[in-house]
């Protein structure tokens, strides 16, 4: 069976569109507004997304450590903050009704949220150092 990346992307987009239309039942209804989108994804897609975001996070975390030096959180800290900020931004955008069925839009929101999260924490750290 030949590998066709276009068909894999189409299946992911179709799955994300279908997920956003479902309403969870029972106890999941309480937690679903925040992370319900991730509840319906396959484990493979979750691990794949986490691995890619971790790789991007490591790259940007190392670059930010070289730029910010003592003002940053170290390469590992920057990476963890980047990953956390990315996923939180995607979840918050989804909670506010922004359709993230297009992967480009989801990545744009995630990257923007990750950099905003690291920037806010760096400003807080700088403010605390001045006290």
Image: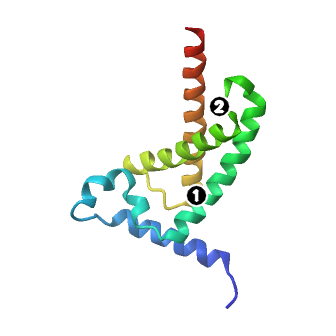
13 sits to left or right of 75: left
48 sits to left or right of 63: left
The residue furthest right is: 66
Tag count: 2
Determine whether 70 is above or below 83 in the image.
Answer: above
Quarter of the image for the C terminus: give it: top right
Can you identify the residue that label 1 sits on? 50
85 sits to left or right of 23: right
Res. 122 image quadrant = top right
Residue depicted at 41% across the width and 59% down the height: 37
Query: At numbered mark 2, what does the secondary structure look like: helix, strand or loop?
Result: loop
Can you identify the residue that label 2 sits on? 73
Task: Give residue 112's position: percent from left, percent from top.
Answer: 58, 41
Dot 2 surroundings within 10 Å: few (below 14), some, or many (20 or more)? many
Determine whether 13 is above or below 111 in the image.
Answer: below
Nearer to me, 13 or 130: 130
The residue furthest left is: 26
Residue depicted at 49% across the width and 44% down the height: 89
- Coloring scheme used: rainbow
Residue depicted at 72% across the width and 34% down the height: 64
Residue depicted at 21% across the width and 63% down the height: 26
Q: Earlier in the sequence, mark 2 or mark 1?
A: 1
Dot 1 surroundings within 10 Å: few (below 14), some, or many (20 or more)? some
Res. 4 image quadrant = bottom right
Query: At numbered mark 1, what does the secondary structure look like: helix, strand or loop?
Result: helix
Task: Give residue 41's position: percent from left, percent from top.
Answer: 45, 67
Task: Give residue 51's position: percent from left, percent from top.
Answer: 63, 59
Quarter of the image for the N terminus: give it: bottom right
Res. 5 image quadrant = bottom right
């Amino acid at each position: 069976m030949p590998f066709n990346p276009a068909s894999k992307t189409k299946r992911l987009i179709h799955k994300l569109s279908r997920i956003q239309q479902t309403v969870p039942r029972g106890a999941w209804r309480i937690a679903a507004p925040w992370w319900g989108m991730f509840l319906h994804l396959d484990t493979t897609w979750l691990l794949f997304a986490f691995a890619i975001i971790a790789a991007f996070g490591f790259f940007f975390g190392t670059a930010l450590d070289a730029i910010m030096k003592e003002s940053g959180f170290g390469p590992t800290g920057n990476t963890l903050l980047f990953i956390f900020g990315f996923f939180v931004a995607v979840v918050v955008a989804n909670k506010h009704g922004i359709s993230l069925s297009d992967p480009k839009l989801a990545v744009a929101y995630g990257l923007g949220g990750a950099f905003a999260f690291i920037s806010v924490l760096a400003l807080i750290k700088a403010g605390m150092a001045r006290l």
